[in-house]
Image (cartoon, rainbow, N blue to C red):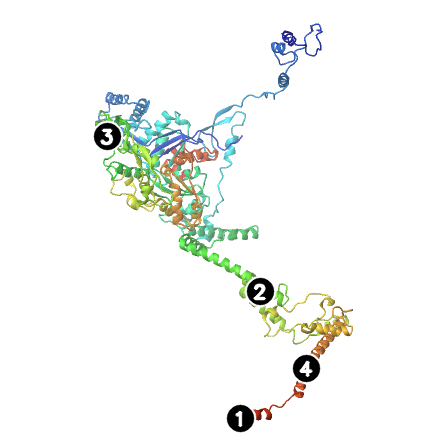
Amino acid sequence: MVYNGDEVSALVVDFGSHTTRAGYAGEDCPRVVCPSFYGYIDDPTPAAGSGSSALEGEDVNMDGDGPGANGAAAGVGSNGALNGGGKRKGRKYYVGDDGVGVWRAGMEVDNFMLDGVVHDAEPAANLLHHILHDRLSVDPTEHPLMLTEPAWNTAKSREILAEMVFEGEKMPAMYFGSAGVLSAFAAGKPTALVLDVGYNHSSAVPVVDGYALRAGTMRQPLGGSLLTSQLHHHFTNPTPTRSFPLSLLPRQLIAKRDPTPEPSLQPRPILRDDRAPHTTASWNLWAQNSVIEPWKEACAEVISTRGFDFQTAKDLPQSLYEFPDGYHQYFGEERFRFTEMLFDPKTYFNQSIEPPAPLRVTSTTEHSHSLKDLVPLHQLVHDSIMACDVDIRASLLQNIVVVGNTSLTRGLTERLDVELALLMPSQKIKIHSPTIPFEKKYAPWLGGSVLASLGTFHQLWVTKDEYEEHGMSIVHQRCK
Amino acid sequence: MSSSDVRAILNLPQAGQAGPSQPPRRSVPVKKPEGISRELYALIGDNAPSLAEAQASLAAFKYRERPKLKSKAVKWEWMRFTPVGKDGLGLGHWVRSDEEPDARVEYFGKFNLHGPSVMQYSQFEYDQHLVDPTWTSQETAYLFGLLREYDLRFVVVADRYEYAGKKRSIEEIKDRYYTICRRLVRTRTASDPQTQQQLLQAYAFDKARETKRKQYASELFHLTAAEIAEEEALYVEIKRMEQNERRYRADRDDLMRTVVGLDSGLIGLEQANGEGVVGLDKNKKRKREEEVPTPAPTKKQKESAAYDLAHCIYRLPTAPSSATSSHLATRHPLHVGVHLRSTKLPQPKPNAAIRITDLLGEMGVSTQKLVMPTRVNLEVFERVLQAAGGLVDMKRQVDRVEQEVRTLRAQREGYVPPTRQSRSMSVVSEASTRRK
């Protein structure tokens, strides 16, 4: 009576730049996927509970925008207020699906991830608490926890997380799985080059026998976030074919929409004037980005064989898309022009547009490129492989695993194949990319789920006792 | 209402009854077959359709019986357990209650093994044998620690290596480790010298060569498309050339077979190419060997000559290899296979074969077969053929000469000296013309 896994009901939590994934080990899909963005309201008078409830009372009037949002958000908010009693007194956090997605007067939006690592302990702890108690409804003291970390994770971030897990949630054991290694495991490969094209970063991590090689780890802030910011500029400015800027109004701010039968006409929706004055700039930006993101998912494509050029751009297929404010248009070359940035950042990345602030943190080092000197994805793969020993290059080239949400862009994998073949014509290249979307999106989580459910893995857990006895050194020693 | 009633109503004769004479009603009804309702049976009577029978047979069909589970459903319990080697960690998992609780833990525990064992050394051994100016004792210890941690995965070890802010290449690490291993194997007393040798072989590592190999490999990594195309073109070219060579060799073999009569006298091209310089030397040696014994026949040879004579063995004289003869001839002396003498009768000269055959036929000698084709007879026969040939030739010459003589004689007989008469005539005619 021995099967593959030995179920110890471990939990796997994967903190990402855009979303955080969580679920039980051994399952094939995360139970909880919620944004890593969080909302907060700084209350100048910590004791004024009535004021905040009045603000939330406004929320109830929302028509169909997140059913049951009120209760959950308020609960988390109070939890956040309890947990975050440290440095920012009176700050109220709104995390999870009903956190940032719900309009609240004066709510600011931020992200606890920076440069791919958890840098803000308080909201992260709030989110973990929300996931464990409100979403999974488990008793944390009974379940060991597997956390993912990027290959370039800092000791400080590990400390934050370990403290959060052992001291905050009192979980019995934990382990840090390197995201690259876990993605390789999810693809069923002990040796692979993992190209993760995510929200904030695209990173290439060579994995050999289940160990991520530091020498070949490369990252750059070229991902979904940068694409969105470029698109944001494109949509909010008039173009030769469109004489007016798009409003990019989110549904939360629109009261009523008039039907616009003709495409490419400026819509005139009726706004919720009561909300507009209380909306913060950060929430507005977040909401506009979340208007652009579905457009990106629906329309954006990469020309898979040859590169993009403006001469042939007119002949490319068009597709109709409608924004929440009612504006709709047949989109043509925009669908291809911006994604071309992934493979030709020198030409198609407009540096004059101000990039999102979190992306500017990444500086140019041996293992990373800053915004100033972005390289194409295939170049990133190439550099990463070239930094490795010559004997393992061939096996890495034949096991390129492409994951990450932005890698779901149609044609990206095919284009990468073409470009790599041009770059290294003498080598045999094989790209493995999961065909099921969620396997691409949640690859590190999936790998963690596989690893934590193995009966042979249990020796690697860092237990609470060990942590209390040895401190962080045991974590660094075990999670290598 | 039975079928007889229906028939009675419709004024039909009763089934099975001929004529109007009606028998008394059967008071005893036929027994109703199984699987048919009473009313229906009353309607259709004993003309029961086959369906009813089929139904009856269906009813008789026995389905497989439901398994009778005597045992109760297995109970699974949520058990606390401690993974092997992890004291103090209370994890829980589901265990069958009939299974002994620790079986699974131990089952997975046996996979918690480490990789290949890393060589160990003592400080004494280090001081005695393992000192290296480029490595300190502490750094060596650090290296061995890393090797143990990563189970001798040199790629990973080189990646993680950082001793006092210094990195080392894979080659350096491998060189250090394998050198230490070799020294330790050599110094430690081994029970079996053979295994010791094997171990030494296994730990062999040539750093310079490895570095060079990696350098070449990385140079090969970046071939441009043009270079690859060139390489491929060259490959195709060499294939073509090989094919040409093969065809040429086949042609030459054919030619040699027809001309010299060698079956496969030529060495293959590949062999020739493969031998190269060494092959040349070998040939020279063979030639020298051949040359040496010929000038002075030894005693042994004389003895064998006497033996041959006594037993009627006749040896063909070996053709002297002269410098002028072709290399083919020297390497492969004319080889004649074993054959019956009668099959190789000397043939008359082809240019006069018919006349020689005729001539010999006149004398009663057949050129086609020879009774008793002994060596002597053959020699005689050949001489006869030669003589006949000579005779025929001579005859031909004589004939020609005679013919010449005859023509000359005929010329002489009919010879009219053309000198005086004709000249005077011409003079006369000339004169006459002048006179005119």
Q: Which residue is mark 3?
A: A280
**Chain that bears disc 4:** B
The image quarter in which residue A464 lies: top left
Q: Which residue is mark 2?
A: B252
The image quarter in which residue A65 lies: top left
Q: Tell me what residue is drawn at x 44 percent, y 38 percent.
A: A187
Q: What amino acid is at disc 4?
A: Gln
Q: Does B93 sit above or below residue B357?
A: above
Give the distance between the C-alpha atoms of the residues marked 1 and 3, in whole angstroms. Answer: 153 Å
Q: What amino acid is at disc 2?
A: Arg
Coordinates of residue B154 in the picture (x, y in percent): 44, 47
Of circles 1 and 3, the one toward us is 1
Residue A373 makes an appearance in the image = no
| Both labels 3 and 2 in a single chain | no
Give the distance between the C-alpha atoms of the residues marked 4 and 1, in whole angstroms. Answer: 45 Å
Front residue of B12/B235: it is B12
Residues at discs 2 and 1 in contact (Cβ within 8 Å) = no
The image quarter in which residue A166 lies: top left
